[in-house]
Amino acid sequence: MSQTISIELALQDRERLAELSRLAGVSERKYLEDLVENALSAAERKRRAAAKTGEAVDERLLSRWRVIVAEALDGATSWTDLQARLARRGVRYAPAGGGLELQDRTGRRLAKGSVVGPSYARLVARFAAPFPGHPHLWIADRVLGRREERGAPCFARPGRNPATAGRRAQSRRYSRLAPTRPLVDKSS
């Protein structure tokens, strides 16, 4: 579906448009359509990259999201309570890397969680639990000072000892390099 939009151009801009479209070998209308489409695509890519890297998206939007998060945090007693309060405002937290991101109802990333509110570590400390479904449970273990050696419950995978996990992974890596048959023939 398309819609017609009228614009006024200064005479010099109109002449530049005619020259550029002639050089491109397309009509002025097609040249303008392509120009607008490229500008909109570039703006969308810039918005996505800014949200992904945590750069300033739009200070007005960020301040609005900060207010929403602050109001939701005021009085929230758990992750479930916080998510319910955020949902009433049309946003939610979701795991992202080692932290959280703020998303809209459709799951579109709006901003890094630490840009619009407290860091993931501070929220873990506040609620004394990891975010439900967060893939990096070791962050909660570290923030809460939990270690299996001390007998405290650990949020890491069941049966996993954080002190030896790295060594086990390393031995699995090297075991794949080991030959599958003996190097020396012992039958003789």
Image (tube, helix red, strand yellow):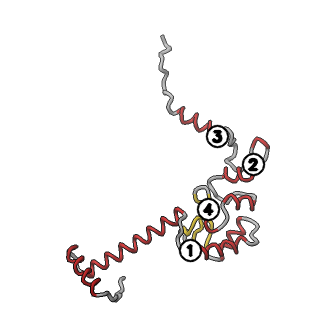
Query: In which quarter of the view is residue 39 placed?
Result: bottom left
The Cα–Cα distance between marks 4 and 3, rounded to whole angstroms, is 25 Å
Instruction: Classify 62 as above or below 136.
Output: below
In this view, the residue in front, 113 or 109, is 113
Q: Is residue 96 left or right of residue 9?
A: right
The Cα–Cα distance between marks 3 and 1, rounded to whole angstroms, is 42 Å
Residue that mark 3 sits on: 165
Q: In this view, does 2 lie to the left or right of 84?
A: left
Q: Where is residue 1 in the image (x, y as percent from the top left)?
A: 36, 82
Disc number placed over residue 100 in the picture, else none: 4
Q: Which of marks 3 and 2 is nearer the N terminus?
A: 2
Q: Earlier in the sequence, mark 2 or mark 4?
A: 4
Q: Position of residue 89 (x, y in %)?
A: 64, 77
Q: Which amino acid does label 4 sit on?
A: Leu
- What residue is shown at x 34% (from left), y 88% (from top)? 7
Residue that mark 2 sits on: 146
The Cα–Cα distance between marks 4 and 1, rounded to whole angstroms, is 19 Å
Q: What residue type is labelled 2?
A: Arg
The Cα–Cα distance between marks 3 and 2, rounded to whole angstroms, is 15 Å
Q: Which amino acid does label 3 sit on?
A: Ala
As drawn, the residue found furthest toward the right would be: 151
Crowd rating for badge 1 (residues with CA inside 10 Å; few <14, some 14–19, many 20+): few
Query: In which quarter of the view is residue 75 placed?
Result: bottom right
Q: Position of residue 85 (x, y in %)?
A: 69, 73
